[in-house]
Amino acid sequence: LMVTGSAASYSLKFGNSVTELLGIGFGAGAGVLLGALVRGHLNPIVTTALAITRGFDYRKVMCYVTAQYLGAFSATALVFANYYNAINAFDGGIRSGFGENTSTGMIFTTFPNPSASIYGVLLDQIICASLVMMAVLTVMDDTNLQIPKYLIPVLISIIICGVIVSFGFNCGAALNPARDLSARVFLLLVGYGDDVFLPLNGLYWLIGGIIGPHLGALVGSVIYLMLIDIQHKTCEHIVLLK
């Protein structure tokens, strides 16, 4: 809700990609900060990566992921309703996902930069998601910085904001399959047509929106386990031997 709302505000008022990215970044950070209060992860890539690599209860994964997708769909619908008049004034009632001066689909979901390739999009999302996942694991691990629990959501929100602002050129603020796919389905239902699924020969929504972020989260988790977590376990083993 925070991400999409901030995108709407900045896109409809300023129409500038730089201010839009900044707004989305801060909106995403605020969303994570608020979402941490209900412990729902907000993002399927975090839930699945934690289940595969960190022992998160597999029985909870489906419930978490379903709630994340339904929440994202509801948030998209709420923002669309809230900005309905502004969107009509901006595009004249002619809905377009991307590619036109009056396109409004990018308010709700992400689209690739015209210069991006499908392989570039995949790499971009693997890098971004791996950075986010490594950061999440780092601040959550008590053996690292021993960060107070009340500061963890704040740090994660700052990290996500930084990643979006730093790496948003190719794919915008993808990173979250629930937000990305749910919004596309909603837009399809309210008159945008299959336009929202067409970028990069119809592969962007799958590669950039779902596969890339999930792979990136797994890569980030494995890197953390192999380079950082293993050192903690080695040190603990040495202490026990002494």
Image: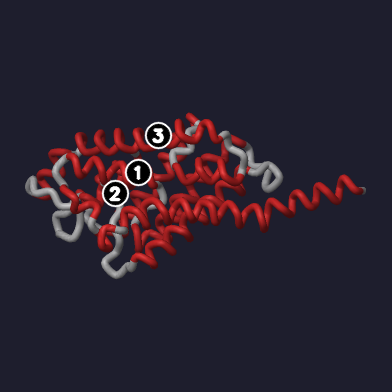
- Determine which quarter of the picture holds residue 101: bottom left
Q: Position of residue 159 (x, y in %)?
A: 50, 51
SS for dot 2? loop
For marks 3 and 2, give the CA distance.
18 Å
Front residue of 109 and 166:
109
Asked if residue 181 lies left or right of residue 99, the reply is: right
- Which residue: 45% across, 31% down? 63
Q: Which residue is mark 3?
A: 66
The residue under label 1 is: 179
Q: Which mark is residue 109?
A: 2
Label 2 close to label 1 by CB (< 8 Å) = yes
Task: Estimate the x, y position of residue 3 in percent, counting from the top left.
Answer: 34, 44
- Which quarter of the figure is the N terminus placed in? top left
Element on which disc 1 rests: helix
Q: Is residue 35 above or below residue 233?
A: above
Is residue 32 placed above or below 207 in the rendered structure? above
Type of amino acid at the residue the image marks with label 2: Thr
Spatial CA span between label 3 and label 1:
12 Å
Residue 82 appears left or right of 4: left
Q: Which SS class for mark 3?
A: helix
Q: Which label's residue is closer to the chain start, 3 or 2?
A: 3
**Callout in the foreground (3, 1):** 3
- The spot of residue 219 in percent (x, y) is 54, 56
**Where 67 falls versus 132 (above or below)?**
above
Looking at the image, tell me whether mark 2 or mark 1 is earlier in sequence order. Answer: 2
Whichever of labels 3 and 1 marks the residue nearer the N terminus, that label is 3
| Residue at the image point whose x is 43% and y is 58% from the top | 125
